[in-house]
Amino acid sequence: MSAPVSTFVNLRWGFVACGAIWTALQLYLIHSYGFDWYIAITDSCVSTIALAGACWLIDNTLRFYQPSKSSYLNLLIWCGLLAGICLAISRFALPAMIKDGEYFVFVIKSLIIRYFTNFMAIGWMAMISLVWYAQQDNKENEKRKAEAEKLAKEAELYTLRQQLQPHFLFNSLNSINALIGFKPEEARKMIHQLSDFLRGTLKKDDQQQVTLNEELAHLQLYLDIEKVRFGHRLQTEISCDEQCRTAVMPPLLLQPVVENAIKFGLYDTIGDVVVSLRGEVDEGYLVIIVQNPYDPQTAKPRKGTGFGLSGMQRRLYLIYTRNDLVETYVNDNIFTTIIKIPQP
Amino acid sequence: MKQVLLIDDEPLARMVVLEYLQDYKDQIQVLQECGDGFEGMKAIMQSQPDLIFLDVQMPKINGFEMLELLEQPPAVIFTTAFDEFAIKAFEAHAIDYLLKPFSKERFKKAVDKYLAQSGTPVQQQKQTESLLEEVATQSPVQHDRIVVKTGTKVKIIPVHDVLYLEADDDYVSVHTAEGSFLKNKTMSFFEKVLDVRQFVRVHRSYIVAIDQITRIDPYEKDSHIAILKSGAKIPVSKSGYVKLKQVLGI
């Protein structure tokens, strides 16, 4: 129960105000029966204080203990019991304080109506407390759930980013191993490229957006490494104007897409492969178009659902809660992926 | 002199193997280097090597699919970068594999092991077969296509292009709209690997793609006949009919 203090303070003042109104009403009522002010004030104060005590008791109990649906009857019995105690206080304390025969008869006669008003007041208090604290609990639960979801989301984003690394990493190390033997200078260069690339993937935080320019710089490191691995077979064309170089996007989004394009291109066709990437800004969106050749005869049947694409789609969904940001087309042996990134 | 093929799509990866093989100049001769599974398959059929170094992830068809197409696969040392699933399969079938990047010592161990036991090719072939069986039944990724050979050509059939499968002696005939292709596997193998939501084994000798069925007619007593969109008539056994009714919810 860590509801903000202010709501408790408000609740307490509300409680005091209700007590005051209750006292005033009772005061007026008793006075209207022809008793003097002294009697009316004593009676209304004593019975209201007793009633307030009972209400406070039931409210406090319900704050820390939420009864299950089956024990509502118990709650009702408790209300009845507390009303009875309040009544007993009125019955025995008031005549002891006010020695007046006419007033004593009035107290005895009004016992039944006092009992039911007490019961109803305590019952109301119980109901309000019940609803109030149940709502507080709900709010708390929802907050906790939202937090848990946020954590899960972050974890998922993290794994989505990581998933593609091992294969690429080990193959790159293998290429370095080969180069060390006969081209040590190139091996050294590739180690630096690989280090820069890995450093780039490690320090990025998903909530922080990067400019397309930064993303492309990172992508270039990846492409340079892939070019060493696959030699002259892989060629890339990257084009975008100055305006879209400053457009922002989630970090590390393009690498899996390009990896996918390279895989489709290199793995499913034999011969040279040109992977092209084009960026443009269009009506509040950064649009990135990636194209690669592919062979419809041998490409896996479920087109475009390679891990690279579905992973990216999931990431965009988690970030923008939209499913319509990625489109893929196939024509004339060219596979096109279009990614739209909403600009702030 | 043992004759060897290198099959890997990365030139640098082949270069490492070539370099390490320098120490075996007197025992091992490298016939050819191949950059993908197609090339590899052709080269194997032409030159019948004793041993191949085979990468798993490759263009067109992967290393396992390539082996599947060979009647008599040679001894294999797999080279792979990262594939948890494949590594499990290699270990289970005691076939040697090298995890990239591998050291010269590790490489020598694998080659020496091969040279020491190269007298028993039959056993090696059995190991390869059981490996392929496991890969095909356990791998989460390979079931969306069937790789078949027609003459010297390789054909890749996406699973959703398959109309039905028919037992044909030791083979299974894969029927598609473009014709039918033989695959040296058993019906129970396909029953195991194909998605049960897409395919039903309606008869001892037939597995049918559910979305191809247009009608089921009674035929003789206790048996039925399924008519496909292509017009093909497929016998349905008594137990096959029960399964079919279950899948179709009738």
Image: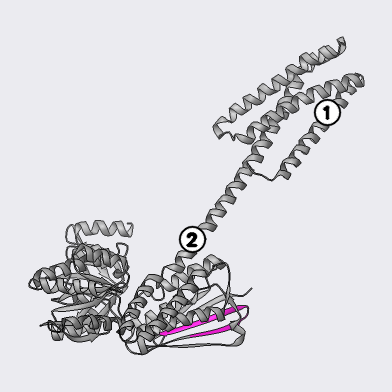
The residue that disc 1 covers is A23
The residues tagged by marks 2 and 1 sit, at their Cα atoms, a distance apart of 58 Å
Q: Quadrant of the N terminus of chain B?
A: bottom left
Considering depth in this image, is B133 or A128 the residue closer to the camera?
B133
Q: Quadrant of the C terminus of chain B?
A: bottom left
- Please state the chain letter of the residue tagged with numbered disc 2 in the rendered image: A
Relative to B209, A172 lies left or right: right
Instruction: Residue A126: name its quadrant.
Output: top right
The residue that disc 2 covers is A155
Instruction: Give the image location of residue A225, x and y in percent.
Output: 41, 81
Residue reaching furthest to the top = A101
Residue A274 to residue A219: above or below: below
The segment highlighted magenta reads A277-294
Q: Residues within 10 Å of mark 2 (few under 14, many from 20)?
A: few
Residue sitting at 53 percent across and 65 percent down?
A: A318
Predominant secondary structure, magenta span? strand
